[in-house]
């Protein structure tokens, strides 16, 4: 195969080198295109734009493959811990036992929030969406560590990583406690990562609370499955914001906001609302499928479709099995799970979904597990954010350490008015 492509334009020739990845993906390097020809590339939604060389996550969307640092998602979901997967994503290799112990100890050591942060939670209205609180508090964390958040200082980056990983579950749980008017529960460092989070969510000071190991295992698996997904909208946001050399807390806070949207991490919450509507309509999946296909109706099947996967999302496959086990154990029969399975079956047999290669994505079944665990709907995207955190950190770190990184600054094709004369207000009607 040739190592360049040629762009002929207006009598000029531009030779674009071909960039080849380790999985033989090929990209056209257009970084010198404008300088040579005056042309820019136009790619709304960045569907054809490779914004980075990345060694973190590989997805083959046609084959339904997802790997973190070369390791397939399936054994990680089955056998790894969230802390180990986080180490793998952030540092590039599976840790030795000693490295894992050190990483875990550091994260455990930083779980407390500064006491001065408590009033922040009180300041929000009781019905505040916890994603708003998570984003605000993550940005707010930076105010406590202003002497240790230099993005170019490796020691600052290391301690910021521990602080983010340690404190975000506390922030998330406290935003929930605030919404239900219960006292904040402090972290218990003797507990594991997911267990500690569930304890802060569901314990009350008046009683003993023991976290069901089945819940811990299911949550751990969900966190692992959400831990990274290469250059998705929130990760690209973290990289773009981070490319300005702002501190990592601010960059991650921006990623949380990007994740909140219903086309991204907010979809898991919307899936449940959609399934509830279908159940209320006596399980009439056909009418919802018809609406999703109707070009004049903005409705989409939530939890279906993906920019990259044109096959079954490998994460959804695992989550569907876990949902089966967890729901059976915790609630027995869940009519919504039944509706979800029927909806999936009907959609996968429908020509529209077959033609457009729309399959269930990670959000389709995850909400059913969160719901069975007793988590409220608006916490679902927060759980996604907790899972995605190590991926954001790893991608941010790769970006900041990459000598090719420049400030992210796309171009545009201007389509507004050409130059015109200003008319003073006194001369306008
Ligand atoms: N229901 C009905 N039609 C759909 C759906 C859907 N869920 N998803 C895509 N389509 C159609 C879409 O209307 C378009 O049709 P046409 O070519 O006739 O205009 C075609 O399929 C391609 O869709 P697109 O919007 O151009 O694709 P995209 O890559 O820009 O969007 C997506 C991907 C995930 C935003 C989209 O599939 C969607 O809105 N899905 C529902 C929301 C959702 O589940 N989001 C979670 C994504 S996975 C987790 C995450 O990363 O956050």
Image (tube, grey):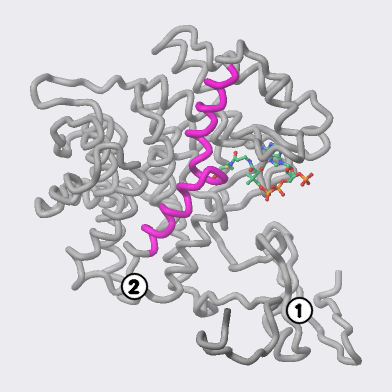
Residue 17's tag is 1
Q: Is residue 285 visible?
A: yes
Q: Quadrant of residue 147?
A: bottom left
Q: Are marks 2 and 1 in contact (CB under 8 Å)?
A: no
Residue found 91% across the figure and 92% down from its top? 11
Q: Which comes before the other along the chain, label 2 or label 1?
A: 1
Q: Dot 2: what SS? A: loop
Q: Is residue 161 above or below residue 172?
A: below
Left or right, 377 with respect to 164, comes to right
- Is 396 a magenta residue? no
Quadrant location of the C terminus in the rendered image: bottom right
Q: Name the spot of residue 263 as percent of width and height, x first.
A: 57, 45
Residue found 61% across the figure and 44% down from its top? 66
Query: Camera-side residue: 425 or 5?
Result: 425
User: How would you classify the magenta stretch by its main secondary structure?
Assistant: helix
Q: Is residue 351 above or below residue 134?
A: above
Which stretch did the figure color magenta?
Answer: 251-278
Q: Which residue is mark 2?
A: 151
Q: Quadrant of residue 149?
A: bottom left
Query: Camera-side residue: 276 or 17?
Result: 276
Left or right, 121 with respect to 251, comes to left
Q: Is residue 113 above or below residue 217?
A: below
């Amino acid at each position: 195969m040739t190592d360049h492509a040629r762009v002929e334009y207006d009598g000029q020739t531009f030779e674009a080198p071909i960039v080849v990845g380790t999985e033989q993906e090929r990209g056209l390097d257009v970084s010198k295109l404008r300088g040579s020809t005056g042309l820019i590339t136009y790619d709304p939604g960045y569907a054809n734009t490779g914004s980075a060389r990345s060694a973190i996550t590989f997805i083959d969307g046609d084959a339904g493959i997802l790997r973190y640092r070369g390791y397939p998602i399936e054994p990680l979901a089955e056998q790894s811990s969230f802390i180990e997967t986080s180490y793998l994503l952030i540092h590039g290799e599976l840790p030795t036992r000693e490295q894992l112990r050190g990483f875990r100890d550091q994260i455990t050591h930083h779980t407390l929030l500064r006491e001065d942060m408590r009033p922040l939670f009180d300041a929000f209205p009781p019905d505040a969406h916890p994603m708003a609180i998570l984003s605000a508090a993550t940005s707010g964390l930076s105010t406590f560590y202003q002497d240790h958040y230099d993005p170019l200082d490796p020691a600052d980056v290391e301690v910021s990583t521990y602080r983010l990983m340690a404190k975000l579950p506390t922030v998330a749980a406290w935003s929930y406690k605030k919404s239900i008017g219960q006292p904040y529960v402090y972290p218990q460092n003797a507990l594991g990562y997911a267990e500690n989070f569930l304890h802060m969510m569901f314990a009350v000071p008046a009683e003993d609370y023991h976290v069901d190991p089945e819940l811990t295992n299911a949550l751990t698996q969900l966190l692992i499955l959400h831990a990274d997904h290469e250059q998705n909208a929130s990760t690209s946001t973290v990289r773009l914001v981070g490319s300005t050399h702002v501190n990592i807390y601010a960059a991650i806070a921006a990623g949380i906001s990007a994740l909140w949207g219903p086309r991204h991490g907010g979809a898991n919450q919307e899936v449940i609302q959609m399934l509830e509507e279908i159940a209320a309509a006596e399980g009439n999946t056909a009418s919802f499928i018809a609406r999703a296909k109707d070009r004049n109706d903005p409705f989409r099947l939530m939890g279906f479709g993906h920019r990259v996967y044109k096959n079954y999302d490998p994460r959804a496959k695992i989550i569907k099995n876990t949902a089966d086990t967890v729901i059976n154990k915790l609630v027995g029969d869940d009519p919504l799970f039944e509706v979800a399975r029927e909806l999936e079956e009907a959609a996968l047999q429908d020509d529209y979904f077959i033609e457009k290669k729309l399959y269930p994505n990670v959000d389709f079944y995850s909400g059913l597990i969160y719901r069975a665990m007793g988590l409220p709907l608006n916490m679902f995207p927060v759980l996604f954010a907790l899972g995605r955190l190590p991926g954001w950190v790893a991608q941010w770190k790769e970006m900041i350490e990459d000598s090719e990184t420049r400030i992210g600054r796309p171009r545009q094709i201007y389509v507004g008015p050409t130059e015109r004369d200003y008319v003073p207000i006194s001369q306008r009607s």
